[in-house]
Image: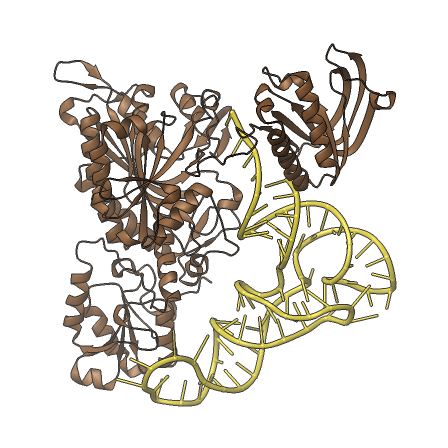
RNA sequence: GCCUCGGUGGCUUAGGGGUAUAGCGCGUCCUUGGUAAGGACGAGGUCGUGGGUUCAAAUCCCACCCGAGGCUCCA
């Protein structure tokens, strides 16, 4: 059945002429009008005849749901054959329409327009977004209505271009793959011992949401002076305070360094592109309209939502030999823009402007691509680990086409073996997107919402679209297979993950802390009295890290408390006895428990080497704020 | 776009027809300190904007703007 629902100021009709299939009607039925009505234009189709009752109840359910959303009390049931080219018999049509009318009339004021007549009608559509909706309804196969298997759910991604719409009957097959290589049905898998994966699968398949409050990182990002909403911009465009900028900068540098280690060349490409560029236009057609667009002079431009455009356009112009493969380029896109739905924007979890490391690898063939995929899979695990998001903190999703799986079963199984835990599998019968295989690492937050961090995809489409070629050993031009990789996922989302993780830890009675290399202040020195300030400065100069000094006019107790609220990993208190002995008294946050700080007496040299060994190999930057707390402004 | 909630000194907020709380922060002073908030005093607000009702509106009503959450939609 096809439904077209229009929320209207009024609808009125008048019969003109009967058709051969016209129902017999009374004169009073020959015209009708309803104010403030939801009009349901309905075409009953052949398929509805297999289960008339089911078709009616589904349609009624749809109409009721829309009516309650738009708060309509009047409903016009209007037969409209032109919505379908596969109509049911007139008899079934009338039965269904009458059935719908009857089922609705309990709760609503319902009118039905006569079936089988040519009618003149006038309608005034309200024009708000919910005022025009179309629905296709297919009744369950039998009257008993066996439920479809729970593991078959509609596709998650939105597919909007005309070409793809035709394939929208496609299904996702959900499974859980265990490290032993067994593919379980996701619906019946026992998640005992893998509760986090259970939450993730639940989130992915059923889209269940039980969220009624802001996630905990929102308060933390503000209290720690990392980031904040910026009312002067569009939603999802944040401001970052010095501490947040420092953290982002370190994360960005780290991911770039790791990319460089695997041979990626860092490049920079524009953030806006011509919407009518022939190649880009085709690409845009395959994506939902989630980009910002801007008009400049007479041109329509859009803001990039990834670095693909710039890098592919660059690849197109390059001369590439098979000897250069795999050829890797990386860009830290500050920013990538996506005009996400308003309700999806919360804190740092999902933004409209975000920093995305985007690496692309051109590979000679599928074999090389698969080998690279595996390397990058491992790289992503290691990158997240160093950032502070461990294997236990995320869940793996692997998505592919059935063909790809059948040809590469061992390879896929190995991916599950590598992480040594069950992973979520989404499989499609045919390929809809540009990739045949992808994985993501998904962080599940304190409110059981999942969001993707690292990802790698094998792209078999864009080399063709962008006309990217390499010359093989025979001198012939070939299309490479392209890998898309974001080793960490969005930088802001990594911060979100860390904050959510620590919030969960605090909830369970732990002491929240950031990884030392990311802590805006690594050591805070607190002099007991003014006369100890000189010694405090001397100590700070012996430490080769981000060390600040709380020289404000406050009590020691209060300064300690504030250092704790800022999650400072090492708090050093110096007074007479330390000056005397030349030592420092260090509170080590990472080894403390609530109300039970771990305090250790050591020399500045010992503290320095302890810290150096902990942050070895990670990027370093100096303080992003004044060393002396007395001259620091407050941001909040 | 729709629904819900909200907008009161820099921040968080109480109140609610008679121009207004409190805490933090900020400033000055006292205190020169030993591990989760020392004390006193002070400055700072036309209560989001515009209209309406009223002798009187921050408070009630209407419209609008902005924010948060939810819903929904999108070639």
Q: Nearer the viewer, residue A118 or B6?
A: A118
Say which of A595 and A583 sits in front: A595
User: Residue at left 28%, top 83%?
Assistant: A531
- Looking at the picture, tell me which residue is in the foreground, A329 or B71: B71
A372 to the left or right of A485: left
Q: Quadrant of residue A45?
A: top right
- Identify the image quadrant of residue A490: top left
Q: Is residue A539 visible?
A: yes
| Colour in which the image shows chain B | yellow
> Where in the figure is residue A89, as x and y percent of width and height?
65, 16
Q: Which lettered chain is shown in brown?
A: A
Q: Position of residue A128 (x, y in %)?
A: 66, 35
**Quarter containing the N terminus of chain A:** top right
For image coordinates 26% across by 28% down, the residue present is A406
Q: Is residue A553 above or below residue A200?
A: below
What percent of the width, then of the height, locates residue A510? 34, 68
The structure's colour scheme is by chain
Q: In the picture shown, does residue A255 fall above or below B43?
A: above
Residue A389 shows in this picture: no
Q: Residue furthest top?
A: A20
- Along the horizontal axis of the image, is A238 left or right of B1? left
């Amino acid at each position: 059945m096809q439904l077209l629902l229009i929320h209207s100021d009024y609808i009125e009709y008048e019969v003109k002429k009967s058709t051969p299939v016209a129902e017999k009607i009374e004169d009073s039925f020959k015209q009708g009008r309803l104010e403030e009505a939801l009009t349901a234009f309905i075409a009953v189709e052949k398929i509805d005849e297999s289960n008339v009752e089911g078709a009616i109840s589904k349609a009624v359910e749809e109409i009721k749901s829309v009516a309650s959303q738009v708060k309509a009390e009047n409903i016009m049931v209007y037969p409209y054959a032109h919505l379908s080219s596969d109509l049911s018999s007139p008899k079934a049509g009338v039965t269904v329409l009458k059935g719908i009318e009857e089922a609705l009339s309990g709760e609503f004021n319902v009118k039905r327009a006569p079936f089988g007549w040519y009618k003149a009608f006038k309608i005034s559509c309200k024009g708000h977004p919910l005022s025009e909706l179309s629905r296709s309804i297919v009744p369950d196969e039998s009257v008993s209505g066996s439920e479809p298997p729970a593991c078959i759910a509609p596709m998650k991604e939105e597919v909007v271009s005309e070409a793809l719409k035709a394939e929208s009957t496609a299904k996702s097959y959900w499974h859980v793959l265990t490290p032993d290589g067994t593919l379980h049905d996701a619906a019946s898998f026992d998640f005992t011992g893998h509760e986090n994966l259970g939450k993730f699968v639940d989130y992915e398949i059923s889209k269940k949401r039980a969220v009624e409050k802001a996630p905990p990182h929102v308060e933390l990002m503000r209290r720690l002076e990392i980031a904040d909403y910026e009312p002067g911009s569009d939603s999802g465009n944040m401001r970052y305070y010095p501490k947040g900028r420092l953290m982002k900068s370190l994360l960005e540098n780290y991911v770039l360094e790791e990319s460089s280690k695997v041979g990626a060349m860092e490049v920079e490409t524009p953030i806006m592109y011509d919407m009518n560029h022939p190649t880009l236009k085709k690409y845009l057609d395959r994506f939902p309209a989630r980009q910002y667009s801007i008009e400049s002079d007479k041109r329509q431009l859009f803001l990039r939502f990834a670095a693909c455009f710039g890098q592919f356009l660059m690849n197109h112009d390059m001369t590439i030999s098979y000897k250069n493969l795999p050829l890797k380029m990386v860009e830290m896109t500050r920013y990538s823009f996506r005009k996400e739905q308003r309700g999806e924007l919360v804190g740092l979890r999902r933004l409209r402007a975000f920093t995305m490391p985007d690496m692309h690898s051109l590979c000679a063939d599928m074999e090389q691509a698969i080998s690279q995929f595996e390397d990058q899979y491992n790289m992503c695990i290691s990158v997240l680990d160093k950032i502070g998001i461990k294997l236990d903190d995320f869940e793996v999703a692997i998505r592919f086409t059935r063909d790809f799986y059948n040809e590469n079963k061992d390879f896929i199984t190995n991916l599950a073996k590598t992480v040594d835990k069950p992973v979520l599998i989404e499989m499609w019968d045919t390929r809809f997107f540009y990739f045949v295989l992808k994985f993501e690492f998904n962080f599940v937050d304190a409110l059981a919402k999942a969001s993707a961090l690292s990802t790698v995809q094998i792209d078999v489409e864009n080399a063709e679209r962008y006309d990217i070629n390499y010359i093989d050993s025979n001198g012939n031009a070939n299309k490479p297979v392209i890998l898309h990789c974001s080793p960490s996922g969005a930088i802001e989302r990594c911060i979100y993950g860390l904050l959510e993780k620590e919030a969960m830890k605090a909830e369970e009675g732990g002491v929240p802390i950031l990884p030392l290399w990311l802590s805006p202040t690594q050591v805070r020195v607190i002099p007991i009295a003014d006369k100890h300030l000189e010694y405090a400065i001397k100590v700070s100069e012996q430490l080769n890290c981000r060390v600040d000094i709380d020289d404000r006019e406050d009590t020691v107790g209060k300064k300690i408390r504030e250092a704790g609220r800022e999650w400072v990993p090492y708090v050093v208190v110096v007074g007479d006895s330390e000056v005397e002995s030349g030592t420092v008294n260090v509170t080590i946050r990472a080894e403390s428990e609530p109300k039970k700080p771990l305090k250790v007496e050591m020399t500045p040299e010992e503290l320095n080497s302890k810290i150096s060994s902990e942050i070895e190999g990670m990027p370093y930057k100096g303080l992003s704020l004044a060393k002396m707390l007395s001259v620091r402004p407050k941001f909040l």
